[in-house]
Image: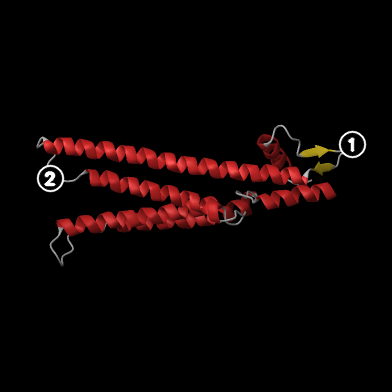
Amino acid sequence: SSPFLARDQRRSWHCNMNQQLVNFGADGRVQVDRQALKRAEAEGKVKCARYLRFAFFAHVAVLILVNIVVWLIYAMLRSRDRGGTYKWPLWVTFGSIVLVIAHLLSMLPYAVCKGSSTCPRWVWVVLLNLALVNIVVWSVYAASESEACPPGQNCEYLWPAWVSGSTALVAIVVALMPCICGALFGIHDDVGDSELENAIYESESE
């Protein structure tokens, strides 16, 4: 029997409780309703895409509301000569843009990539967000240095180098983790649906 059989049965029953997708015959052999399984998987993908879109737009709506409130507070304080001339809400807006980009990068691998045991999609999510962290850190460093230092001089400590070094180390560990877990423990995450289907079909034919 396949090691994926029990897990696939649980997932199929969880996705479609009113329809039996996997049955055991009188002789103990596994019988799979392939058409029902494909319909259940298609429905699950549609629901997943709908939830992802809702989560993204809800996230954007909350960030827009936060920015509106922050800029209103800044405008009120400035009108009373209490807010000063420094536009501190720009940092809130900058952080909001970074969060939206991070959300998009986290959704991207699941939208365009097919998961596999050797390169799970969550690995790409981590690597893309680590790259975003480096871009943000070096952008903040460049902006702060241009304001604090005279033209042509380097007076800021190169602290982003520590961030880049540590994130590079994390990226290497994360990239190798699926191979290490698979070799040592036989654990492979993010197995594609087609692999699970093949495992069931092989069990049916045995």
- Outermost residue, left direction? 81
Looking at marks 1 and 2 on the same chain, the residue that comes earlier in the sequence is marked by 1
Name the amino acid, label 1.
Answer: Ala
Determine the secondary structure under disc 1. Answer: loop
> Residue 40: image x %, image y %?
68, 42
The residue carrying pointer 1 sits among few (fewer than 14), some (14 to 19) or many (20 or more) residues within 10 Å by Cα, namely: few
Residue that appears at 60% across and 57% down: 118
Residue situated in front as seen by the camera: 205 or 76 = 76
Rendered residue at 74%/52% (across/down): 198
**Of the residues shown, which amino acid type is indicated by label 2?**
Thr
Can residue 17 be seen here? The reply is: yes
Name the residue furthest right. 27
Where residue 180 sits in the image (x, y, percent)?
58, 54
Q: From the viewer's perspective, is the residue at label 1 or at label 2 nearer?
A: 2
What colour scheme governs how the chains and residues are painted in the rendered image of this protein? secondary structure
Q: Could you tell whether 183 is left or right of 53 in the image?
A: right
Per the model, the C-alpha gap separating discs 1 and 2 is 80 Å
Q: In which quarter of the image is the N terminus?
A: top right
- Going by the picture, which residue comes out furthest to the top? 18
Task: Judge by depth and name the residue closer to the eye, 29 or 1.
Answer: 29
Can I make out residue 4 in this image?
A: no
Element under disc 2: loop
How far from the left and from the top, in percent, is residue 77?
15, 36
Q: Where is residue 17 in the image (x, y as percent from the top left)?
A: 70, 32
According to the image, label 2 marks what residue? 85
For residue 28, above or below residue 148:
above
Residue at the far bottom: name it.
152
- Quickly name the residue at label 1: 26
Quadrant in the rendering for residue 140: bottom left
Q: Which mark is residue 180?
A: none
Query: What residue appears at the point 35 percent right and 49 percent down from the top-left corner?
Result: 98
